[in-house]
Amino acid sequence: MYFTEKRSAKKNKSWLKQKILSMAFDTGLIRLGRRFWSTSLTVLNYHRIDDPTRSDFDSFKPNVSATPLEFDRQMRYLARWFNLITINDLVQWLEGRQNLPPFAALITFDDGYLDNYRFAFPILQKYGFGAVIYLATGHIATDQPFYWDLAAYCFSHTQREYATFPNGSEQAWSGPTERDQILKSWIEAMKKLPEAKKQLMVSKLPAQLNVSIPQDYFRNLMMTWDHVREMQGGGLAFGGHTVNHPILTRVALETARTEITVSKSTIERETAQPVLSFAYPNGMASDVNPEIVSVVKEVGYRTAFTLLNGPSSLREVQKDPFTIRRIFIASHHTLPEYAALVSPINRYRN
């Protein structure tokens, strides 16, 4: 009875929140005070553009930022209320060589999934928008999945109903919804581990869940370098996101330096263009420190991005161009929620 009431209260609270946001969106209240943030930078962070509800989707659902339809609606909203810039515009401004327009916005993607090419790229071209995609180069044109996608495959295809966590505890589920929640908890637990221990845990997961992964199963999950070059020809830019996507504060500094350096040099070799910017894997406060920032500067990047909540005033960006904030977009966000996320009030939410 207690849990039923608790779920009901949560559902009612969510319904009320959606109702208020929809009203604020429809009336324009959601943009109240916007003019005071004309000298700001709104950086959007996407990962995947796909439909996580389709029956054959067996990779990590929380990494989907929007369906193609919702992404199109979001781009239409940006086109109306923001002035889109490129990473080159931002760097030129940081170096004092040009001004930024009022209500400047930058679109970014992390990792390099194939659906960025299949679904996001045509929509970006439709609106005439540039974007920058941060590539984890060790996964481009390979069958090597990110650990969260491998875990999602194993959880989706196992006949078992429990998983073992790093502390040795077991968590069981009774259906797909609980299983997906436990998968998210398992992924979060992995993020807290030193990189070597995380990789060991991940390597044991298929056997623990008694799952066999077909050869080349993940081959079409990520972009190839031909996709990268085609998108570059269509106005998109690419940035460094390490080679293997470790959380950089969980590895030795020299390992971090190699990850940061090789990512940049690989992209420059494949695209014949300089790489101007870097995105920190995971990108939260504990994932970046002054030593890592120093390496990013030394390697030759001109700016870098976190996943700390935005938007940012231009004064903030100018003061510290190597920890610029980005707004994380998730597939459960409605258009009114999206409008709230890209508004100044987003900086004050918990």
Image (cartoon, rainbow, N blue to C red):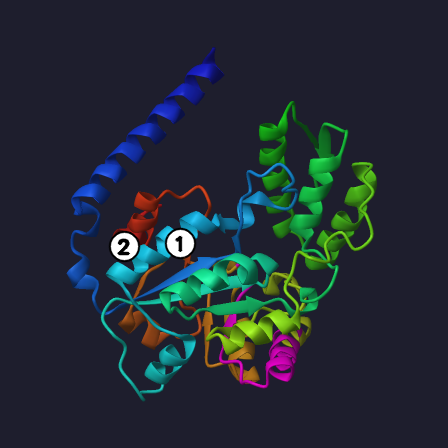
Q: How many marks?
A: 2
Res 168 visible: no
- For disc 1, the neighbor class at 10 Å (few under 14, some 14 to 19, many from 20) is some
Location of residue 164 with respect to 291 vertically, above or below: above
* Residue interval drawn in magenta: 259-282
Along the viewing direction, whichever of 278 and 29 lies nearer the viewer: 29
In the image, residue 171 lies in the stretch drawn in magenta = no
Disc 2 marks which amino acid? Ser
Read off the residue under disc 2.
Answer: 343
Residue depth check, mark 2 versus mark 1: number of the one nearer the observer: 1
Q: Quadrant of residue 94?
A: bottom left
- Name which residue lies at 63% across and 75% down: 263
Is 334 displayed left or right of 117 in the figure? left
In the image, residue 281 lies in the stretch drawn in magenta = yes
Q: At which x and y percent is residue 163? A: 72, 34
Disc 1 marks which amino acid? Asp
Along the viewing direction, whichever of 34 and 336 lies nearer the viewer: 336
Location of residue 265 with respect to 25 vertically, above or below: below
Q: At which x and y percent is residue 234? A: 48, 74
- Name which residue lies at 64% across and 84% down: 269
Location of residue 65 with respect to 281 vertically, above or below: above
Q: Secondary structure at mark 2?
A: loop
The disc, 2 or 1, on the residue closer to the chain's N-terminal end is: 1
Read off the residue under disc 1.
Answer: 72
Q: CA distance from mark 2 to mark 1?
A: 19 Å
User: Mark 2–mark 1 contact, CB under 8 Å?
Assistant: no
